[in-house]
Image (cartoon, rainbow, N blue to C red):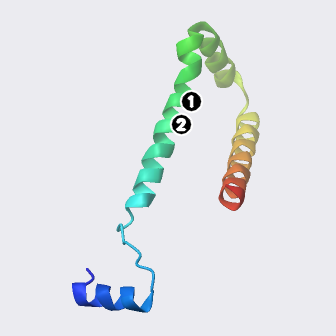
Amino acid sequence: MIRLSTLSRRLERGQKIVHDTGGLNMWVALVTAVGLMLVIEGIMPFINPRGFKRTLSAVTQAHDRVLRIAGIASMIVGVILLYLARMFL
């Protein structure tokens, strides 16, 4: 906590005052990301349940190697999107 006298001295010197949220912004971002992921994942079963079942059936029949390649490709695309968002947005 910043004392009032320290705060007034900083204001007199023109220093910026940064409010410490104690990591709250990180939790807000994490909960937002998980919520958005759940919404996006829920779209297909809501709109087309039969197609979703067929897709899940095809996934269970796929070889482990194919699933691993799809998983790593998805992670790479996600990391690139996160990087671009942090750099340019």
In the picture as drawn, the residue positioned furthest to the left comes out as 4
* Residue neighbourhood size for the residue with mark 2, other residues' Cα within 10 Å, grouped as few (<14), some (14–19), many (≥20): few
Q: Residue at x 43, y 59 (%)?
A: 25
Where residue 65 sits, quadrant-wise, is top right
**Residue under label 1:** 40
Count of number-bearing discs: 2
Q: Secondary structure at mark 2?
A: helix
Q: Residue at x 71, y 57 (%)?
A: 88
Q: Position of residue 51 (x, y in %)?
A: 64, 11
Quadrant occupied by the N terminus: bottom left
The residue that mark 2 highlights is 37
Q: CA distance from mark 1 to mark 2?
A: 5 Å
- Seen at 37% across and 85% down, the residue is 11
The kind of residue on which mark 2 rests is: Met
Q: Secondary structure at mark 1?
A: helix
Residue 21 spot, x, y in % from top left = 36, 66
Residue 43's x, y, as percent? 56, 21
Q: Residues within 10 Å of mark 1 (few under 14, many from 20)?
A: few
Residues 35 and 67: in front is 35
Asked if 47 appears above or below 64 in the picture, the reply is above
Please say if 48 is above or below 43.
Answer: above
Q: Quadrant of residue 6?
A: bottom left
Is label 1 in contact with label 2 (beta carbons under 8 Å)? yes
Q: Nearer the viewer, residue 10 or 29?
A: 10
Does residue 57 appear to the left or right of 37 in the view shown?
Answer: right
Vertical placement of 68 versus 9: above or below?
A: above
The amino acid sitting under disc 1 is Ile
Q: Position of residue 74 (x, y in %)?
A: 71, 42
Specify whether 27 is left or right of 1.
right
